[in-house]
Image: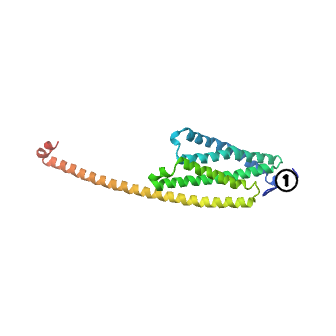
Amino acid sequence: MENETVHCSFIIDSPLRRLRMFPMNVAMLVLNGVFCLTATVQNMPVIAAIVKTPSLHTPSNVLLCSLALTDLTVGCVVHPVFVAFKARLLLGEFWCLLLLVKEGLLLYTGILSMLILLAISLERLIALRLHLRYGVLITIPRVLAVVIVTLLSWGLVVCTWPLGVSINVVSSISVAIMVVVAVALVAVCAEIFRILRRHQMVIWNQNKLQAEILTKKEICSRHFVCCRFVFCLLFPERFCYYSF
């Protein structure tokens, strides 16, 4: 296999390609080894804190924990598979099965992270728009149901590739989902910023009005004290002794 051209799905491997890609493969091997550790170390405390602390069991934290679990899967599974594939490639062995597993996991976890991130943004928008109705509509069981349905539905789409569906079809679906999610994220974040900006202006106007009222009261109080002081200087026997 070392001197043969290998066809694996959309990848065509050859000794010349391995030689040309050698520096990049070494760099990718090192980087993914580092990212494997950082993704694991950074996400495990988040998951442990949310799971062990009852006060953190909220819909927003359930989504945050789901995102952390996805990133932890990337660190514990995707990166090691990627490192193993690159290591075997540097040794002159091209494993088609390992390539398919790597690409499938990358596709699954990448889109899944974007979908959960969109769910987090929508949850924050609903919290800002609905106010008191938020606690009734957005509950932990409903959020868990949304997360599970998202996991299973996107998993079924990715599994159609090994079952015989063309990689072009799966890639087209993935690109379409990424574009839709990216546009939706921009729209949701813009709406959140607009609502927060409006609330900020309302609070600023209220504080300004309150400051103006306090300023008027302070001016009246100062004028009254000054007048009393002047009268005390002019007529000490009549005003000062009886006033204090």
Give the percent coordinates (x, y) of residue 85. Answer: 77, 47
Which three-letter amino acid code belongs to the residue tagged 1? Pro
Badge 1, how many Cα within 10 Å: few under 14, some, many 20+?
some
Camera-nearest residue between 24 and 72: 72
**In percent of the image, x 51 and y 51: which residue is there?**
138
Looking at the image, residue 125 lies above or below residue 47: below
Disc 1 designates what residue?
15
Camera-nearest residue between 213 and 95: 95
Dot 1: what SS? helix
Visual colour scheme = rainbow
Camera-nearest residue between 68 and 240: 68
Q: Is residue 140 left or right of residue 30?
A: left
Q: Quadrant of the C terminus?
A: top left
Q: Is residue 24 left or right of residue 61?
A: right
Question: In the image as oriented, which residue stretches furthest toward the left?
Answer: 238
Give the percent coordinates (x, y) of residue 12. Answer: 81, 57
Q: Quadrant of residue 11?
A: bottom right
**In percent of the image, x 18 and y 48: which residue is there?**
228
Number of numbered callouts drawn: 1
Question: In the image as oriented, which residue stretches furthest toward the right?
Answer: 3
Q: Is residue 60 left or right of residue 207?
A: right
Question: In the image as oriented, which residue stretches furthest toward the top?
Answer: 52
Give the percent coordinates (x, y) of residue 158. Answer: 70, 54
Camera-nearest residue between 20 and 51: 51
**In percent of the image, x 58 and y 55: which residue is there?**
118
Q: Is residue 241 left or right of residue 202?
A: left
